[in-house]
Image (cartoon, rainbow, N blue to C red):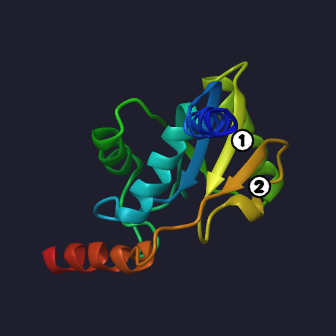
């Protein structure tokens, strides 16, 4: 009798843990200045998809010309992400020297796109979470082991562009 109850309870807790919460939006913000989404990027976005009904991905933009830090424009990166995650909402978020102003802009974008939703911000290593000054809760997701660095991949993009000139 007790074993049956334990099995049913364990099954329920496992199922509950893996269920998406209704009326939630998971938010990921990043530069994604890479030629392709690497395993770590995909892992983060897919973990958010498992936890939340909706996904909002904010792509950081500087507004300046292409550089070694920002070799790809917003449209290239948004298309790359939408091709793998067509249900995700992809928006532009401008860099700002003030973390508070930047956080206010992010909160506004979230409210504009998902009014009435419970919001959870997600990040991984070297993410925006320490700089966020808004009121939404956040959760760090451990990165996959041995996932490549976006910085290294960004250097590949810049070398390809330099070879074309």
Q: Is 20 rendered above or below residue 135?
A: above
Dot 2, how many residues are within 10 Å of its Cα: few (below 14), some (14-19), or many (20+)? some
Tell me what residue is drawn at x 37 percent, y 66 percent. Answer: 71
Tell me what residue is drawn at x 36 percent, y 45 percent. Answer: 81
In three-dimensional space, the C-alpha distance between marks 2 and 1, rounded to whole angstroms, equals: 11 Å
Tell me what residue is drawn at x 60 percent, y 25 percent. Answer: 113
Position of residue 123 measured from the top left corner of the image (x, y, whole percent): 61, 57
- Label annotation for residue 132: 2
- The answer to which of marks 2 and 1 sits earlier in the sequence is 1
Residue position for label 1? 105
- Element type where label 2 sits in the image: loop
Q: Is 47 rendered above or below residue 19?
A: below
User: Which is more toward the observer, 72 or 9?
Assistant: 9
Q: In this view, does 121 lie to the left or right of 7?
A: right
Position of residue 106 measured from the top left corner of the image (x, y, whole percent): 69, 42
**For the residues carrying marks 2 and 1, which lies nearer the camera in this image?**
2
Q: Is 132 rendered above or below residue 149?
A: above
Tell me what residue is drawn at x 61 percent, y 34 percent. Answer: 4
Q: Quadrant of the N terminus?
A: top right
- Contact, mark 2 vs mark 1 (Cβ under 8 Å): no
């Amino acid at each position: 009798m007790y074993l049956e109850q334990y099995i049913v309870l364990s099954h329920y807790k496992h199922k509950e843990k893996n269920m998406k919460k209704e009326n939630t939006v998971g938010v990921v913000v990043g530069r994604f200045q890479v030629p392709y989404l690497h395993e770590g990027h995909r892992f983060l976005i897919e973990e958010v998809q498992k936890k939340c009904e909706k996904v909002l991905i904010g792509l950081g933009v500087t507004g300046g010309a292409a550089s070694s830090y920002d070799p790809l424009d917003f449209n290239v990166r948004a298309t790359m992400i939408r091709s793998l995650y067509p249900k995700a909402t992809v928006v532009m978020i401008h860099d700002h020297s003030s973390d508070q102003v930047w956080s206010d802009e992010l909160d506004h974008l979230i409210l504009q796109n998902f009014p009435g939703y419970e919001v959870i911000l997600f990040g991984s290593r070297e993410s925006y979470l320490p700089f966020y000054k808004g009121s939404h809760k956040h959760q760090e997701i451990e990165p996959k082991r041995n996932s490549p660095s976006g910085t290294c991949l960004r250097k590949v993009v810049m070398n390809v562009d330099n070879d074309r000139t």
